[in-house]
Image: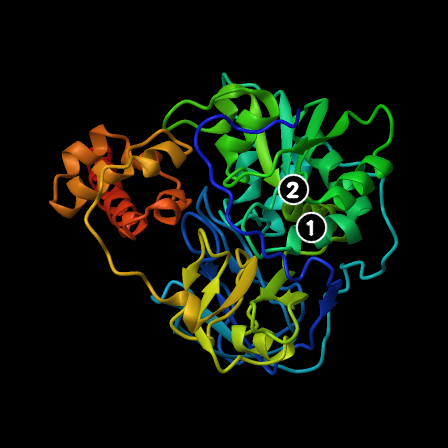
Amino acid sequence: MLKTFKIGGVHPEESKLSANSPIEPIPIPSKVIIPVGQSLGTPATVIVEKGAEVKVGQLIAKGEAFISANIHSTVSGKVNKIDEVTDQSGYRRKAIIIDVEGDVWEDSIDRTSTLVTDCILNPEEITKKINAMGIVGLGGATFPSHVKLMVPQGKKAELLIINGVECEPYLTSDHRLMLEKGEEILVGVQLLMKALKVEKAAIGIESNKPDAIAHLQKLIKEGSGIYVVPLKVKYPQGAEKQLIKAVTGREVPSMKLPIEVGCVVNNVGTAFAVYEAIQKNKPLIDRVVTVTGKSLKKPSNFMVRIGTPVEELIKYAGGLPEDTGKVISGGPMMGKALNSTDVPVVKGTSGILVIPASESKRVTVQNCIRCARCVSVCPMGLEPYLLERVVSTGNLDMAEQHRILDCMECGSCHFTCPSGRSLLDYLRLGKARVGHIVRTRVNN
């Protein structure tokens, strides 16, 4: 029997329209917009000025805080300006705008396709280089990867878990990466194991990707300590706590990190980026982005330079369909609607989903009928109907008591509610307000 997590979960329509579309690089745009805050934590500090000439891979903003990440130029050209621009969140944030001239790379970057397996760096040197290359979690959380590798005193990492689940409907970037860059991913996994000083790594992949499971199992060398764990298809299995539960049976306590149960989780895209950073001296300057939708002419998986406007990706996928009702960054469950397609791709952009108007309209909200479906599908064991009510009435103390901060915004409650209630909206609002209260309390 295939493994999975125990509590909650749903089965949305998969709609993996681009699963058979190989990764395809798209042309470099004439201008890139590179936000300096592309990870959790403090935005990086700009270290270039207007008019500066830059190369591909050159450091242009330095992550100086403990939780922060370096930013590198993804193109060659001239810095047009440093300004605040609207990003995917809809807020204006600082960014470096570069006019592209040619495609000149830093000499230190190995651009060949030769697989490099040997590494003489020790664990601390690997972690330091991952930090220097600006690697962040590419599953969507964008947590700086070097921080995950710095195990707190008194804790011990026992198992590295690689997330190849990709349970969000429509998205296929990780699936294609496992099929096309399997050897590089496995070297990246070994580098992460070395940095963490662990002997074992489990790659969790849902059973709807049998080709990826078979491919990686074939590539894994005996005695490497790496093994694939096929998983039952169930959303949101790609979430850290649910993946750990599915693979190991261990339960991460409320408000705690995976290291509490001896695990560290990284995405397959992150493992590939680590390979390129350590073995090829290549900073995180590009990534695979799925561009998809039922009315889109050419659902695709593109290799994209960070900073490329979203509208460029849609253009190469056949253009924006006339019946478009909404464009989402990410998948339909956890993604967020974009106000404009003139926003840049960032390190955390895994997909762009174009939804027809007929499917993007919200249903009329009805009264809660106390069916408790939202409770039964919540993978964190929360009571979404109750949290919606207390947040809507401003009772944030009760929201905190009922563990609203444990909500990971998977949207399972909203997906299953027969009354069309905006449960996820209220949970996000409540989390933000309660989180602010908790941070203020701690700082005082």
Which of the 4 image quarters holds residue 198?
Answer: top right
> Where does residue 88 sit, x and y in percent of width and height?
42, 65
Q: Around disc 2, counting alpha carbons within 10 Å, would you say few (fewer than 14), some (14 to 19), or many (20 or more)? A: many
Labels 1 and 2: the sequence-earlier one: 2
Q: Quadrant of residue 77?
A: bottom right
Do we see residue 157 in this rendering? no
Q: Is residue 389 left or right of residue 131?
A: left
Residue identifier under label 2: 164
Type of amino acid at the residue the image marks with label 1 = His
Please say if the residues under marks 1 and 2 sit with CB atoms less than 8 Å apart.
Answer: yes
Q: Residue at x 54, y 54 (%)?
A: 70
Please report the residue visible at 28 percent of the width from the left and 43 percent of the height from the top: 431
Q: Which residue is mark 1?
A: 175
Task: Classify 177 as above or below 1.
Answer: below
**Which of 435 and 285 lies nearest the eye of the viewer?**
435
Give the residue displayed 29% in from the left and 35% down from the top.
372
Q: Residue at x 51, y 43 (%)?
A: 11
